[in-house]
C-alpha cells in the first residue's frame, strides 16, 4: 500500500526501456511492517532530465555520485538499504505501485554491506 518503507536493494542491473533509454533496474525488498518480505521493482532512467532521480537514489543508498562521465556499475547498489515512498497510480484502469522518492535510512552504516568473498586473487 502507499506509505514509506525501509527496503534493501536485492538486485540492480543496467537495462533499457522499450525506446532504448538506459536505466537502472532495481529489485527491492521491504524490511518492515505489514508488507515485510514483499518485493518492489523500479526503473531509474539515466538521462540528463532524470539525473536528479539517479542522484536521489545514490544519495539514499549513501553511495558517492560519480564525477565526470557517468560510468556506474549498478551492482554496487546491491545490499544497500534505502527508504522508499510508495504511491499508487491508476494507469489504464489498473492501480500501479510506484516508488515516488528515495530517502536515507537514519543510522545505517553502508560499511556493513557484505563484501564479495575474497577469491584469493592478489591485486
Image (tube, rainbow, N blue to C red):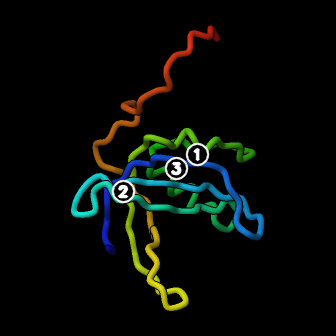
Q: Secondary structure at mark 3?
A: helix
Query: Residue 61 location in percent, x, y?
Result: 45, 47
Left or right: 44 in relation to 41: right
| Total numbered circles | 3
Please give the residue where the numbered disc 1 appears in the rendered image: 65
Residue drawn where x is 76% and y is 70% of the image: 19
Query: Residue 107 location in percent, x, y?
Result: 28, 43
Residue drawn where x is 58% and y is 62% of the image: 43
Work out whether 109 lies above or below 9: above
Q: Are marks 3 and 1 in contact (CB under 8 Å)?
A: yes
> Which label is found at residue 83?
2
Separation of residues labelled 1 and 2 (CA atoms): 18 Å
Query: Residue 58 location in percent, x, y?
Result: 52, 49
- Comparing labels 1 and 2, the label whose residue is closer to the camera: 2
Image quadrant containing the N terminus: bottom left
Please give the residue where the numbered disc 3 appears in the rendered image: 58
Residue 103, located in which quarter of the rendered image? bottom left
- Nearest the viewer among 48 and 44 is 44
Query: Residue 106 location in percent, x, y?
Result: 29, 48
Q: Secondary structure at mark 2?
A: strand
Residue drawn where x is 36% and y is 31% of the image: 112
- Comparing labels 3 and 1, the label whose residue is closer to the camera: 3
Q: Are marks 3 and 2 in contact (CB under 8 Å)?
A: no
Of the residues under marks 3 and 2, which one precedes in the sequence?
3
Image quadrant containing the C terminus: top right
Work out whether 92 lies above or below 24: below
In the displayed orientation, state which residue is furthest to the right.
Answer: 20
Q: Secondary structure at mark 1?
A: loop
Amino acid at each position: 500500500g502507499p506509505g514509506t518503507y525501509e527496503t534493501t536493494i536485492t538486485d540492480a542491473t543496467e537495462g533499457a526501456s522499450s525506446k532504448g533509454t538506459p536505466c537502472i533496474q532495481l529489485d527491492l525488498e521491504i524490511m518492515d511492517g505489514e508488507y515485510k518480505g514483499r518485493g518492489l521493482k523500479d526503473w531509474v532512467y539515466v538521462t540528463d532530465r532524470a539525473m536528479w532521480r539517479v542522484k536521489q537514489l545514490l544519495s539514499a543508498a549513501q553511495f558517492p555520485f560519480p564525477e565526470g562521465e557517468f560510468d556506474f556499475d549498478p551492482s554496487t547498489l546491491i545490499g544497500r538499504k534505502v527508504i522508499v515512498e510508495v504511491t499508487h497510480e491508476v494507469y489504464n484502469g489498473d492501480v500501479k505501485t510506484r516508488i515516488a522518492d528515495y530517502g536515507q535510512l537514519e543510522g545505517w552504516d553502508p560499511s556493513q554491506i557484505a563484501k564479495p568473498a575474497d577469491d584469493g586473487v592478489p591485486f
